[in-house]
Amino acid sequence: MPAGAGSPPQSGGRVLILFTRDLRVHDHPALAEACERADEVVPLFVLDPVLLGRSPNRTRFLMESLVELDHQLSARGAGLVIRRGDPARSALTLARETGCTQIWLTEDVSSYAHARASKLMGSDVQTLLFPGHSIVEPREVAPAGRDHYRVFTPFYRAWSQAPRRAVLPAPRKIAVPGDLDLGPRPDPSTFPSDSPEVVGGGESAARVLLDAYSRSGAKDYADDRNLPARDSTSRLSPYLRFGCVSANEVASRLSDQAELTRQLAWRDFFLQLLGADPGLATQDLRPGPEISASYPDSLEAWKEGRTGLPLVDAGMRQLAREGWMHGRVRMVAGSLLTRRLGIPWGEGLRHFDRLLLDGDVANDAGNWQWVAGTGTDPRRTRVLNPVRQAKRFDPDGSYVRLYVEELAGVPTPLIFAPWRDPELLRDRGYPSPIIEVPDKT
């Protein structure tokens, strides 16, 4: 059921659907209900200049997703209205111009989303918020006497037992006003990405990927999810971030994969944490551990993948090349930055936020705080050794060889610790480690 000010969803009249990061027509509760109840629908997306400059990779992905959303709407008799400016102000202006008596949108949890919803709900146009970002909505599970969980395991138990909404089909037909001014069409070619090998955005790409993964890839996830060279992850995270496919549908399609479903639960966990405390994006959830070593001048080497620690460098170069990094390697790179280099997790988050296609406030802040020991990890002193992690999860060095070209032909024993052969480092131009590495690792 929607949440918002005033009466329940109307029947008849015109409703404005404000798309945000729910860029799809399948399993879209607000759009589905509008097509059932309203006489006409006005689909709108507002390009906010405040957000467009944060990540060229995500901006390009966004533009491609908007082109695809416009295509999906057009195939159903509609079209996506594009405006530029403040989303709430632009939505209210268009609602008044087109005679829409209500604005419907998918509820979100960030401080930006809260501010947008507050502007809309403080206006003369009734606003309703619908589910759609989470599998289980943030307020639907909570411990006794509190409004949210701060520890994952009890959250996961409650989450696993919570009811799920049905996956909704895409509307067959969307009626829109005949004189609707759609505005300028998005042109992805005018928004170059920072990374040369980013994937393309859009609902069709997401659904093709989900179909293929559900047929064959998901079966290997539980065994191989931590092996970056196998890359058995779904690669759906950018599409989930922009809502090109709903997490609810992914969970439904892959419900027989327990470990994968557990990872989707982490996404909901961080969403309910951020919803309860928007300050999570920038402030420690709890005090961090004491860091004995500190190498503040090493931040640029870390960003560039020149730390001299092959697994970390492979991950950072994958990030620069693809706008994506394998999850296990994200943890190792984050642990090095915060636990060994003594650099605040916010520095790492800002670098990731610029490049990651799946950059998301709740997930990113939650995971960075987890690895830095200021978040929800019960073992707050946990430090991931990058050499041991490489030997365990990239045992033949395939992942490192793929992204660290200087080490492509190095024998396997040396690929974990190339500094043991100073001549090799000199000949190949690979740096010595920026931290002191124990001889026995």
Image (cartoon, grey):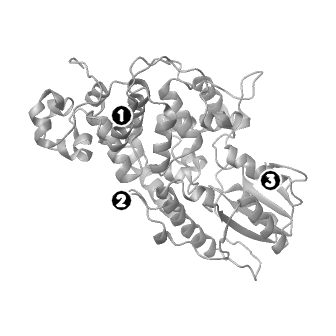
Q: Residues within 10 Å of mark 2 (few under 14, many from 20)?
A: few
Tag 1 or tag 2, which sits nearer the N-term?
2
Residue at (46% x, 57% y) in the render: 57
Nearer the camera: disc 2 or disc 1: 1
Q: Is residue 419 left or right of residue 129?
A: left
Calculate the distance from the C-alpha at mark 3 to the C-alpha at mark 1: 42 Å
Which residue does the numbered mark 2 point to in the structure image?
A: 196
Residue at (65% x, 33% y) in the render: 273
Mark 3 secondary-structure assignment: helix
Calculate the distance from the C-alpha at mark 3 to the C-alpha at mark 2: 38 Å
Q: Is residue 291 left or right of residue 227?
A: right
Mark 2 secondary-structure assignment: loop
Which residue does the numbered mark 3 point to in the structure image?
A: 119
Residue at (66% x, 27% y) in the render: 149
The x and y percentages for residue 364 are 53, 39
The x and y percentages for residue 250 are 54, 48
Q: Which mark is residue 298?
A: 1
